[in-house]
Amino acid sequence: MLLVAPVDQAVRQQLTDELGQVESLFVQELQCPLECVNRLVAHVERYRGKRLRPLLVLVAGMASSPDGSTLTDDHRALATVVEMVHMATLVHDDILDEADVRRGGPTVNTLRGNETAVMLGDYMISHAYHLCSSMDNQQIARTVAHTTNVVCEGELLQLANRENWELDEEVYYQIIDRKTASLCGTCCKLAAVINDQPQKVQDALDNYGRNLGVAFQIIDDLLDLTGDEDTVGKSTGRDLTKGKLTLPLIHFRINAPQEQRDTFIKLLSSQAVNNDDSVSNQIRKMVTDFGSVQFASERASELIAQAQQALLVLPDSPARKLLHEMAQAVLTRQF
């Protein structure tokens, strides 16, 4: 995310240095006397592409600091914690989705089976909590724990609605607010908590992160529907094969003429069972031609505008500008 946004040179250098420290702490915290564990951790480290969540902690920490740039050890620890939590969710998501590819390489469940993947995700979560316990402000540990609970609630709500062809936008937003946006909001809010900022600033940054997170998930869902595996870098079309209704699909089901809707639901039901490329292509064409893909893209743009508006509570600084540009970059990402 950092590389696709215009960045002040001094801020770029600072963030490069800070991310280096976060990555060192990540490796140090997950180091194990057992080489078989270290090999698995090394494999998962290749998943770390956009580094959006640690960047949100660092840049929000800079933007909410008294001088607009200073970060603390707690910011670096928090950035490491949220990356561990996120990586654990990716490992577990790949099991749920039966995904074969992540970042252009095989998933842990493909390499070593579901049992190993489950335990590796648990290992990373437990180390995230261990690192949290070293921080002076225990509000941070409690908030991270609460957020991981909320993420799990979102995943369970999504599982409960697989092949629910009547899913509406309200429940869809509940799912993605919990499973994706909650962690993004926590990244930004806790960065301000560490800086002892007032509630108004904490709430504004939480609002920024949540709106960015919802938009990010909408774009992610669009990439799963319309992207190709080589560009996206992970298995695509999994939402259709797992019976997950995402925003463009919901929009089509609600707004298309009845005859098209009936055909659409038959195709969705078929794809959830048979995983036929010709069926997925037909579904993709229907929602694209009807304007449902465009609708979802425009909704993501609205959310990004709301996220950027929330930043106005912060004083102007290169870090605030970067938060603005990071949000904008969500809309144009291809991976």
Image (cartoon, rainbow, N blue to C red):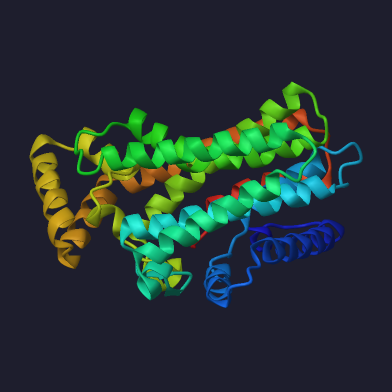
315 horizontally vs 191: left or right: right
Extreme residue toward the right, this view: 67
115 horizontally vs 177: left or right: left
Q: Quadrant of the N terminus?
A: bottom right
Q: Which residue is rendered at x = 77% and y = 52% of the image? A: 76
Residue 93 vs residue 289, the one in the foreground: 93
Q: Position of residue 285 (x, y in %)?
A: 23, 56
Q: Which residue is rendered at x = 84% and y = 59% of the image? A: 14
Relative to 226, is 213 above or below? above
Q: Position of residue 162 (x, y in %)?
A: 24, 43
Relative to 335, is 218 above or below? above
Query: Exactly how many numbered labels are in the figure?
Result: 0
Residue 182 vs residue 329, the one in the foreground: 182
Q: Position of residue 245 (x, y in %)?
A: 28, 43
Residue 20 vs residue 319, the one in the foreground: 20
Which image quadrant is residue 273 in? bottom left
Q: Which residue is rendered at x = 87% and y = 59% of the image? A: 10
Residue 113 vs residue 223, the one in the foreground: 113
Which image quadrant is residue 35 in? bottom right
277 horizontally vs 238: left or right: left
Q: Say whether residue 211 is visible.
A: no
Relative to 254, is 265 above or below? below
